[in-house]
Image (tube, grey):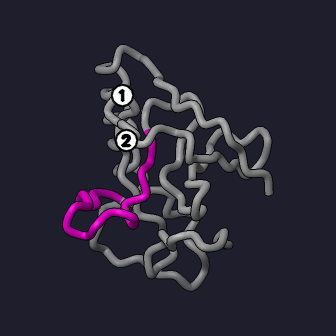
Amino acid sequence: MSILPPAFPIAADNGGIPYALYRKDRIRLPDGTAGLAEFRLSDTAPTRRVLTTCCNTPIFLEFEGGHWVSLFTGLWPENQRPEPRIRTQTGDVPDGVTLDDSLPAGTMTTAGFYAKLLGEWIAMGFKTPKFEIKERINA
């Protein structure tokens, strides 16, 4: 994994990226989006990472067409971070990394997670709010 200098590191000790999912209709960017840029792993990637243009610090990850954003909690003061509830994408864990049993993970946990996401989208009237990010980083 590479970090754009002088970005604030967001990975946990085990290499995972702690994040909290929030509905897009409940997110407010206090300074707007003028100081943000998007980065995609390819031109057709369905996800984008949004970071600050001043210091390249990642703020959130967004799935195109999704009704939520994944906010990187490593940036929050420890006493203000929401408690983690589950692990997702554990199939991507690199060889040699062992995860502890402190959080539920696996197929059934993930299925319940997606059911909750669907319930929230229904509550939003199937809307997918947009964050217009004008600047793009090409790497």
Question: Dividing the image into 4 quarters, which one contains the N terminus?
Answer: bottom right
Q: Which of marks 1 and 2 is nearer the N terminus?
A: 1
- Quick check: 125 above or below 61? above
Taking the view exactly as shown, the residue that stands out farthest to the left is 79
Residue visible at 57% across and 53% down?
51
Residue visible at 36% across and 28% down?
25
Taking the view exactly as shown, the residue that stands out farthest to the bottom is 96
Q: In this view, does 56 lie to the left or right of 24?
A: right
Q: Tag 1: Cα neighbours inside 10 Å, few (<14), some, or many (≥20)?
A: some
| Amino acid type assigned to the residue bearing label 2 in the image | Pro
- Mark 1 in CB contact with mark 2 (< 8 angstroms): no
Q: Reply yes or no: does residue 72 show up in magenta.
A: yes
Taking the view exactly as shown, the residue that stands out farthest to the top is 125
Q: Residue under circle 2?
A: 30
Q: Say which element carries label 2.
A: loop
User: Residue 44 appears at what percent x and percent y?
Assistant: 77, 38
The part of the chain drawn in magenta is 69-86
Distance CA(mark 1)–CA(mark 2): 14 Å
User: Residue 95 appears at what percent x and percent y?
Assistant: 60, 80
Q: Residue under circle 1?
A: 25
User: Residue 2 appears at what percent x and percent y?
Assistant: 68, 72
Q: Which of label 1 and label 2 is nearer to you? A: 2
| Amino acid type assigned to the residue bearing label 1 in the image | Asp
Picture quadrant of residue 3? bottom right
Picture quadrant of residue 54? bottom right
Q: Reply yes or no: does residue 120 show up in magenta.
A: no
Q: Say which element carries label 1.
A: helix
